[in-house]
Image (cartoon, grey):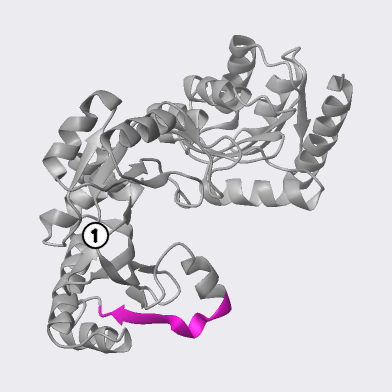
Amino acid sequence: MNLHEYQAKELLREYAIPTPRGVVMENTLHAEVATNELGGSRWVVKAQIHAGGRGKAGGVRVVNSVDELRQVADELLGRPLVTYQNAPQGQPVLRVLVEETLAVARELYLSVLVDREKERIAVVASSAGGMDIEDVARSTPERILRELCDPLLGLQEFQCRALAFALGLRGTQVSELTRLLRNAYRLFVSNDLSLLEINPLVLTEDGRLVALDCKISVDDNALWRRPRLADLRDASQDDPKEAAAHAVGLNYIALDGNIGCMVNGAGLAMATMDLIKLHGGAPANFLDVGGGATAETVAKAFKIILSDPKVKAILVNIFGGIMRCDVIAEGIIQAVKEVGVEVPVVVRLEGTNVDLGRNMLAQSGLKILSAPSLTEAAQLAVAAACNEHGRRKP
């Protein structure tokens, strides 16, 4: 789960990590109040969306008057902002963050994340912070510095000093970065984060280190014990189908294909999507209905899948271990009748009472294609989607 920049910075300040002073606005009525609170004569207006690349997309602008602030905020609020990370639809801007401007001497990059290959928390830094950090990582990877943290000892001071010296910091800046890094590590661990990215971390002309921008992602699997963070979820930033699935407890991720997938088990879902791609198709989603799928769960899953207008066929791949195949077949039949599915549905069942489940599907009188194997199911789904796509062409 991602946080907005203003939410992330509130968390940074709780852990004594300096940020610019800012005010969040949901409309232009409070523009003068915001500028009076911040003081000065120049401010930065930042669109609040869960995507990177805002600066290049016009979502971060410097303004020099209250009138200009109102104009820019009015252009951003209530409209989708499209960046390279959320194209083509973009995400709606419901809030803007207005911040004081700082005299910046240098821009650095800092992140804390999980290195899954090393099974360690990693601290990553670079002297080339800013909007083009991805290009730096690709073209000059030697400029990306990394320290792996011991699971028991955590991030040590000597590692922080090594990063500070490698970044070209000197004097009190070394101890300041050490303190900032250790606070960032503590924030990361204490809140079950999956990513903490400060880009840029700026060195101001008066020698201070300030987090000018911040992105925080929380591990979804830990939200049950982080209710305060869970309450910060902004459903407007999610794909509507993903938000609907989250509301009913389904694991759904929208993709760009035209074959809807309904599977029980994340591993089986990945294998199902791989087989669809192998046979020339493209999955429209990842959807794990879980091991205890019921008729109600299946019906909700069908509704979410069919809310995607790109879907031309649905592949249901269920392994009946905890749940018997006849119970699953009954749920599929009820769901197809209830939802009124008009696209082809391919079902592959395996497990307990599989023959009974297949017979129930065959005798249902519905246009459900039963497949004995996953390979055949994928082939049927790809063929059905192609036929449906051709049939529906104007």
Q: Please state which of residues 349 and 2 is positioned toward the viewer in this rendering.
A: 2
**Picture quadrant of residue 208:** bottom left
**Picture quadrant of residue 119:** bottom left
Q: Is residue 155 left or right of residue 136?
A: left
Around disc 1, counting alpha carbons within 10 Å, would you say few (fewer than 14), some (14 to 19), or many (20 or more)?
A: some
Q: Quadrant of the N terminus?
A: top left
Q: Position of residue 97 (x, y in %)?
A: 28, 41
Q: Amino acid at mark 1?
A: Leu
Q: Is residue 350 above or below residue 131?
A: above
* Residue 105 sits inside the magenta stretch: no
Q: Please state which of residues 250 and 141 is positioned toward the viewer in this rendering.
A: 141
Residue to which mark 1 is pinned: 102
Q: Which residues are magenta?
A: 139-150
Q: Do we see residue 249 in this rendering?
A: no
- Residue at (11, 54) in percent of width and height: 14
Q: Position of residue 128 (x, y in %)?
A: 41, 75
- Residue at (34, 74) in percent of width and height: 122
